[in-house]
């Protein structure tokens, strides 16, 4: 299948998942994860209708954004673990930073974001996996309060990546827990946290059923990574 054909298949699957959940497809943003993919692949998915692209590495994002400069309808997302010494390459240049995992990182983003500010998400490690970033659910309230007060940033919601599993349904407890945590934090902060970034190629339908607003899909769109 071509990238355009896979894109159309994914959008149809997202629409079907939304219908089953009683939601509108307009509520779900598909972030096409283009890490390690060449610029030609990004152009192909953009031509097929994608508007949001996700990158895991700062240098790769900067290089691709430069190659596709001049496209006002294209929005970049940084979805990987962002090192503080790479913040200057990302802050103020992307629509959303998905995986902020601490106050110091958020402070650095705020300093580098510029006048427009930088929307960010708080990454929550619900599986307690040592190999993944993100904070614990128990630490989330205090860290969310601290980050919400940082000038230059806008805390827009939460993201998570559940432990890997062959069965998509295995991700449901983590997705449901993230939504419940988001609702609780929104109440405690007295402000909306509209974004839930959760779900990937194998489990995005379950994530949508649990309230995902952003699904991060790479392999199902671009094929296996080189």
Image (cartoon, helix red, strand yellow):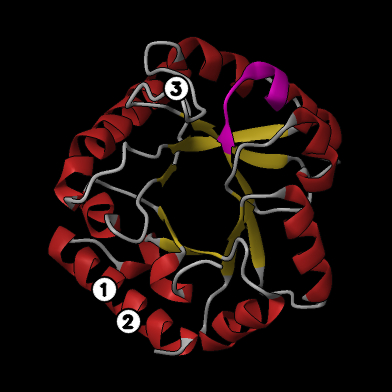
Dot placed on the residue nearer the N-terminal end, 3 or 2: 2
Relative to 222, is 67 on the left or the right?
right
Segment tinted magenta in the rendering: 99-106
**Crowd tier of the residue under label 1, counting other residues whose Cα lies within 10 Å: few below 14, some 14–19, many 20 or above:** some
Determine the residue positioned at 71% across, 18% down: 104
Determine the residue positioned at 82% across, 32% down: 85
Callout 1 touching callout 2 (CB < 8 Å): yes
Q: Nearer the viewer, mark 3 or mark 1?
A: 3
Describe the element under mark 3 as helix, strand or loop: loop
| Picture quarter with the C terminus | bottom right
Q: In the image, is residue 100 part of the stretch drawn in magenta?
A: yes
Determine the residue positioned at 39% across, 25% down: 129
Relative to 111, is 192 on the left or the right?
left
Whole-number angstrom distance, CA of label 1 to CA of label 2:
6 Å
Whole-number angstrom distance, CA of label 3 to CA of label 2:
34 Å
Can I make out residue 69 in this image? Answer: no
Q: Which residue is mark 3?
A: 130
Callout 3 touching callout 1 (CB < 8 Å): no
Comparing 146 with 2, the one in front is: 2
Q: Which residue is mark 1?
A: 13
**Above or below, comparing residue 40 to residue 130 in the picture:** below
Indicate the position of residue 11 as horizontal and vertical percent values.
35, 76
Q: Which residue is mark 2?
A: 9
């Amino acid at each position: 299948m071509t990238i355009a054909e896979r894109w159309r298949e994914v959008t149809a699957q997202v629409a079907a998942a939304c219908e089953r959940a009683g939601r509108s497809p307009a509520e779900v943003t598909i972030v096409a994860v283009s890490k390690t993919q060449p610029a030609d692949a990004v152009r192909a998915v953009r031509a097929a209708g994608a508007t949001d692209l996700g990158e895991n590495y700062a240098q790769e994002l900067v290089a691709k954004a430069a190659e596709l400069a001049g496209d006002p309808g294209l929005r970049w997302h940084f979805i990987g673990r962002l090192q503080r010494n790479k913040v200057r390459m990302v802050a103020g240049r992307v629509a959303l930073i998905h995986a902020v995992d601490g106050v110091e990182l958020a402070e650095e983003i705020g300093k580098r974001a510029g006048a427009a500010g930088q929307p960010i998400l708080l990454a929550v490690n619900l599986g307690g996996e040592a190999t993944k970033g993100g904070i614990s659910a128990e630490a989330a309230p205090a860290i969310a309060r601290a980050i919400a007060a940082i000038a230059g940033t806008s805390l827009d919601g939460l993201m998570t990546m559940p432990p890997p599993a062959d069965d998509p349904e295995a991700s449901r407890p983590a997705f449901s827990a993230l939504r419940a945590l988001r609702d609780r934090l929104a109440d405690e902060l007295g402000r909306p946290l509209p974004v839930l970034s959760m779900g990937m190629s194998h489990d995005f339908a379950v994530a949508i059923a649990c309230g995902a607003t952003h699904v991060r899909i790479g392999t199902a769109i671009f094929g296996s990574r080189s």
